[in-house]
Amino acid sequence: MAYVSIADRDHEIEHHDPQTFITKYVWSQDHKVIAIQYGVTALFVGIIAMGLSVMMRLQLGFPDNFDLITPESYYQFVTMHGMIMVIYLLTALFLGGFGNYLIPLMCGSRDMVFPYMNMLSYWVYLLSVIILLASFFVPGGATGAGWTLYPPQAISAGTAGSDLGIILMLLSLAVFIVAFTMGGLNYVTTVLQARCKGMTLMRLPLSV
Amino acid sequence: MPIAIAVIVLVVGSVLFHFLSPWYFTPLASNWVRIDQTIELTFWVTGAVFVAINLFMAYAIIKYRKKDGSKATYDPENTKLETILTVATTVLVAALLAPGLLVWANFVNVPEDAMEVEAIGQQWHWSYRLPGNDGQFGNVDSKLISNSNPFGMDADDPHGQDDILIMNPEVHLPINVPVKFNLRSKDVLHDFAVAQFRVKMDLVPGMETYLWLTPTVIGRYEVLCEELCGIAHHTMRGAVVVESQEEFETWADSYPTYAETTAVVAGDADAGASQFTICASCHGQNGEGLQALNAPKLAGQSGWYLKSQILSYQNNIRGSHEDDILGKQMAPMARTLATDEAINNVVAYIQTLPDHAAAATIEGDVVAGEKAYAVCSYCHGGDGLGIQAMNAPRLAGMTDWYLENQLKNFQLGIRGEHRSDYYGKQMGYMAKILHDDDAVKNLIAYVNSL
């Protein structure tokens, strides 16, 4: 049953702390655990993006030396490296990871105001990462349209991944947006509503 | 303490690097010196702030390091400090923004007397259009673009009849004359950029954008496409040649007007037949090619490509490299076609010749070749029949030993390295994707199967 925190009436509701490994570390609603989940996933996908940047550097340093790196695959590396680093690493790590961890601490609140939605936002983010990585394995490969994904280039014949790759990329972005809208709502509401007594908006740390 | 030292080393290192760095701006060749000045001002402001803040930070770390008995002063608000910092930051940011805005105002207001040139971008070539004697561009429409009308000219517009159409990635400009480049894209985003001119502008499909400049130094400058436009974006190059007014006019006159391109008389195949007898001695009676004489199959090849290659041989763009022995044989043969009419006639005749697929002499792994061919297919077509709009000739059914030779020539720079051979240069880049002889053979084995 969802737990609604009402400050002076805690004793009225049977409050069970999570007991099992799964509820403590996997399906956790605790903001710190969720933040670590975000961080680990973001770093994992960031390492993949770093590998892509190594491939780019190999081509720039030793042009036309590697069979794997053709113009098609090079642009795929450029695009996916950009997308992953900016969105799936930076946004997820800073907003999802550090944000989730520190915002309740900096406001002096117990947790985020919507812990269930917080947990959901992480799992939807993970889904978006899986869809993104799946785009590497579809026929045509990942999209090679540049990380700004401009149409009509993204869907025209002279670009890698112009059929399935770009579709999965956009699907992954849409799912990501859902996840981060949920997270964002959470942050805004927490900061506005759940600050502890005496913590005015002007006293908040600047990074909140 | 170590952190303070690291910060000081960082500052000293950065300053030293600025003065000892081997890199510099490519020399300016246009009127946009204000852009360079803006960059310099930005550098000085940010450089000064960088040095000042870092040195201050190092000083603070050292002076206020933890000592026994030291206690932090309680200083929660300091209105004077806040005011100073806010005002100083505002002034510096304004100093950074203002020159940029002033230069931008200059950039969007094109001088009244600027001559106009249109640069058209497509995947993956540049072409240009001059307004001609009436000084006005004719109407164009994407719907009208076709192989015979690559510029999309509207035949009903009288202003378009004298437009000079330059189907070549190289454009010439007269020195010291302000010029406005009208930019139009046929398909996706591109960007017209010449580093020495400092100005660049995106080409947006559906929009007409522009840039203007006054070239001030005679020379030849490379045009780069600077907005990712597909897999051959890095090969989309061209050139701007700045020269005297007379040389510019000579160059402009060497290109046909739109009216002249539509008035081209189709080649006469019967007249071409007699011309072809010279060619037949190497290329075969039916243009089927003769390997012993190193003459490739001509029958079935696109007419526009045959013509462009003959012109390339005549102009020494092809066949002039010292290692291109076979090309050097072909060049004088191409010159036996003395007039444009003769070329058209021969090409028309070749197109009447029966087209049977050449015998396959090269073997390789077709599956690997198919994978490699994916990149080629974007220009040469999935069926290998060539795409005129991409300036890519037919490959399927043509003599495979010749394809192998040409790929090797492209890889080694024996073909494609001539300054004016832009399409050849593109092929050079693309040919280098194939890393060894086996890759080439596999590719050709696949093309043979098409």
Image: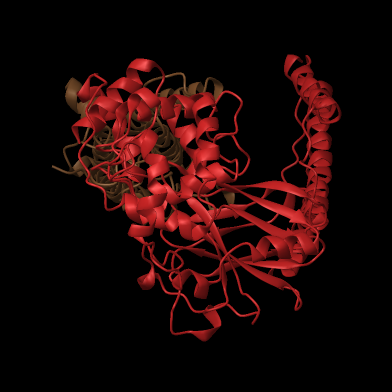
Chain colours: A brown, B red
B79 lies above or below B120: above
Residue A206 visible in image: no
- Name the residue: 82% across, 21% down: B62
Give the residue at x 16% y 22%: A20
Q: In this view, does B375 lie to the left or right of B87?
A: left
The residue depicted at 42 percent of the width and 23 percent of the height is A51
In front here: B231 or B150?
B150
Count of marks, rendered view: 0
Toward the viewer: B206 or A44?
A: B206
Q: In this view, does B7 lie to the left or right of A66?
A: right
Give the quadrant of residue A1: top left
Image coordinates of residue B230 in percent, x first then y, are 41, 46
Among the 4 quarters of the image, the one containing residue A34? top left
Q: Residue at x 82, y 56 (%)?
A: B216
Tell me where residue A135 appears, x and y as whole percent.
Answer: 26, 37
Looking at the figure, which quarter contains the C terminus of chain B?
Answer: top left
